[in-house]
Image (cartoon, coloured by chain):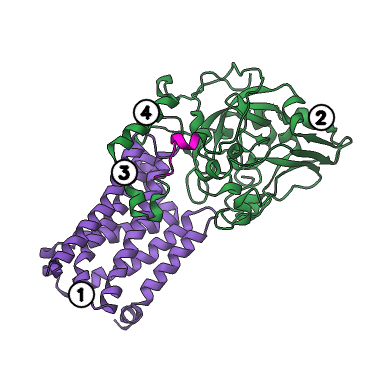
Chain colours: A green, B purple
Amino acid sequence: MLIKTPSKSALKTSDITDESVYIQRRKLIKSMGFLGVGALLGSAITTTANAGFFDNKDADSGSFKTTPLNFTSDKDNLSLIKTPEQKVINHNNFYEFGAKKNQPAELSQNFKVNPWQLTISGECDNPIRLDYNDLTTMFALEERIYRLRCVEAWSMVVPWIGFSLADLLKKVAPNSSAKYVLFETLHDPEQMPGQRDRRLGGGIAYPYVEGLRIDEAMNPLTLMSVGLYGKTLPPQNGAPIRLVVPWKYGFKSIKSIVSIKLVREKPQTTWNKLAANEYGFYANVNPAHDHPRWSQASERRITSGGLFARNRIETLPFNGYGEEVAHMYKNMDLNKYY
Amino acid sequence: MLFTTSNKVLLLKVVIHLAAFLPLLNLYTLAFYDQLGADPVQGVIHFTGIGAFNLLLVTLTVSPIAKKFKLGYLLQVRRLLGLYTFSYAFMHLLNFLVFDLQLAWSLFFNEVVKRPYITIGMIAFVLLAALAVTSLNSIKRKMGKSWQSLHNYSYLVAILVSVHFYWSVKSEIISPLFYMLLTIVLLAFRYKKIKTLILSIFVK
């Protein structure tokens, strides 16, 4: 239904590496004695290299507990080569837990998601408040295997689990003044080190806010995700509930949401406020409109394979979801409204 | 005495080789086996980039320290440090071209011309390459006085690289600002020399 064609440059199934193989390799390299050289030098530059990716100890020390979910599988997108789970949960832009890609996974494992409150309010007839259990029980959950294109020109394929935002919005019955939807991430500096430490948090304004036009929010592709790879979300991926808008750059897909508000005016959004010339409100994936500092015409698809993986592929308009979403922007100059 | 000056220089050089080369070996081994974070390409680019900057700053620290503490022999390790600076910068560029852009040459040339932060990074690299090539003793002798004038460009390289770093980030500007500050401090030690250099441009 939603997505039809596997990308021409899709990787072979044989490229998927089992997690146990990673761990074995890790041990092999350790036994070769290369590890720790950087640590010996004690310089700041070595910390990234020795971040302990796939390290056994990372897997069990104070690890956040995710739980299996019941959902209907996405049978339509099986041909998409998924990004290995270990990469999906260890390579994150979630500045609330640190601006480096490996930091969210390292600094978020004690994050508390229960109790949680998500309010849906604003221009609607039946504002509601969801508690933690409602998030996974209020709607039938379905798996959606989506491409995720980061504005930084890398991409992944992630099997999300969740429900349509449209279903949630119908429950609150938006009124005719509801033109836009405003989303807000939890603001809790005690739990989110990036919010209390400017250096760690990358210098963006908190709480993180994002927005969609009402028709974008009601599009069937727009997903409220509560899980990935069959289980509830880990904190670094936006637990307990996040947005996924697959035809827009990743920063639109706001994480750990506490508030959804139907509003009259186009809301201010975090990255747009910070650098409006680089990050637009719409932020639709568009290979013809470059980021001022890099080309958006192609991307590196992160799957498995090391340094020599030939994974640069062409970026598709609307991230390949044009058939489902292009009609919403029919009379718009997408170079002006980037 | 065990620690003659030449022994000290030799020891320093061994330490520099170990400290600069082994991390590279470690880095590329991890990246090759897909153990360097989820995106090994980003990993090697950032590591070699910041590594080159670190080495450049260390190189620029040598002569102020040698002067202050009257340790003239330290000057003998400057070339090695400078060559490692160039090597890291070379790997940084190679990582971008080979692993990130995957030899899409037209994209590479477009990016170098279109993106200011890449343009100035490239200028800094070309200057570093000129300094590396002319570091051979035979060439140095032939160049006479012009060798020093050419190698004064290392100060310009430091400025270009700090701007390159600052312009390359999305919002996390604290580290680039810190590096910029370090650069300014190191150049401040050469205040008189740099002032003369700048004035000579206008006098000519």
Q: In the rendered image, which residue does mark 2 sit on?
A: A170
| Horizontal and vertical percent position of residue A224 | 69, 32
The quarter of the picture where residue A120 lies is top right
Q: What crowding class fits label 3: few (fewer than 14 Cα within 10 Å), some (14-19), or many (20 or more)?
A: many
Residues at discs 4 and 1 both on one chain: no
Is residue A96 part of the magenta span, yes or no?
Answer: no
Q: In the rendered image, which residue does mark 1 sit on?
A: B72
* Residue A179 horizontal side relative to residue A77, left or right: right
Over which residues does the magenta segment extend?
A: A50-59
Query: Of A125 and A18, which appears nearest the observer?
Result: A18
**Could you tell me which chain the residue with mark 1 belongs to?**
B
Q: Nearer the viewer, mark 1 or mark 2?
A: 1
Residue at the image position 18 percent from the left and 66 percent from the top: B8
Residue at the image position 13 percent from the left and 69 percent from the top: B4
| SS for dot 2 | helix
**Could you tell me which chain the residue with mark 4 belongs to?**
A
Amino acid type, residue under disc 1 in the picture: Gly
